[in-house]
Image (cartoon, rainbow, N blue to C red):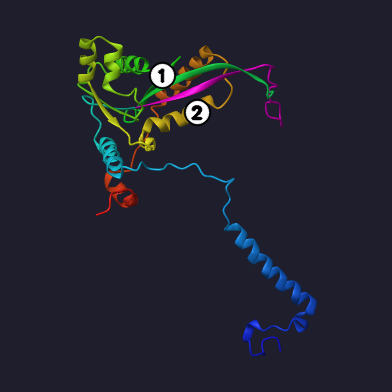
Amino acid sequence: MLFGGPGGADAVDAAVAGGGADEAEDRDERVRGNGAESAQKNELQPWRKQCWCIPEKDAARFVAQREEVLDEYAKPPSDDEPLVCMDEASKQLLRDELPSVPMTPGRPAREDYHYERRGTQAIFCFFDPHRGWRRVTTRDSRTRVDWAEEVKVLLDEHYPKAHKVRLVCDNLNTHGIASLYEAFPAEEAHRLARRLELHHTPRNGSWLNVAEIELSVLSRQCLDRRIGSAKDLRTEIDTWTAERNRDHAKVVWQFTTPDARIRLKHLYPQF
């Protein structure tokens, strides 16, 4: 009998089941080996890591700024006080040293691994998620003055009739009213500041900025390749921007403050 021993179903006679004593020993050895392999998986592996967004230690400030931004997204669209999100990025300019080989049927394009570095360009992205409009520009630097000049264009050229623009941006030290006073005379800086309402995302919480989503799309669709000059970069970005604006590509944000209090409850101070 296969299952007639005192051990029940586990007491299998290896010889009757089709294997001898040697095979039974081999089976026991494999079981012990699997246990050792499982233990090895639980050991520390210092060569491995994960990139993770770790919230700041000041939980109260983190959730306060997060709810402020989420509340702005929840407000209905307004022509008098439009919502605009802005973010920055940089693009390294790389020029091929040898011409690329174009694609052919059944074979992708090929480029030589040698390239020439041609500097970097700063990218400024202003995105209106309700209108499906964006403005993306390039500059040689990302200073306070650069940011202030970009904001002035936004206010005076793109939203001249708006009483106030609600601008969501991250916590860079250049993103502040002081930058306006560094770039312009006090009277002009004061005029611009009165039409600008800043809302900063939390530290380590830039994922709350919709403009970051738009820059991600730009990177995947337009910048994920070598571009060798600032002129070519501007041409590519202008073409991409015109197409996106023509399609009125929008972002429908659905994550709200009540959602955060449930799904991210562990990030709130506990009482």
Q: Does dot 2 land on a helix, a strand or a loop?
A: helix
Packing grade of label 1 (10 A; few <14, some 14-19, many >=20) is some
Find disc 2 in the rendering and name its residue: 219
The location of residue 150, given as percent across then percent down, is: 35, 16
Say which amino acid is labelled 2: Ser
Q: Residue at x 50, y 15 (%)?
A: 235
Vertical comparison of 142 with 256: above or below: above
Q: Kindly indicate the quadrant of the structure image that contains residue 101.
A: top right
Sequence-first disc among 1 and 2: 1
Residue at image position (25%, 31%) is 77
Residue 20 vs residue 141: left or right? Answer: right
Instruction: Determine which residue is flagged by label 1.
Output: 142
The percent position of residue 112, horizontal first and vertical second, equals 69, 23
Residue 154 vs residue 188, the one in the foreground: 188
**Number of numbered callouts drawn:** 2
Percent of width and height locating residue 8 = 62, 86
Cα distance, mark 1 to mark 2? 18 Å
Single out the mark in the foreground, 1 or 2. Answer: 1
Residue 211 in view in this figure? yes
Q: Position of residue 210 (x, y in %)?
A: 37, 33
Residue 92, which numbered label?
none
Q: Nearer the viewer, residue 231 or 130?
A: 231
118, 127: nearer the viewer: 118
In the image, residue 90 lies in the stretch drawn in magenta: yes
Compared with 245, 259 (above or below) is below
Nearest the viewer among 266 and 240 is: 266
Residue at image x 66%, y 65%?
34
Q: Tell me which segment is drawn in magenta.
A: 86-110
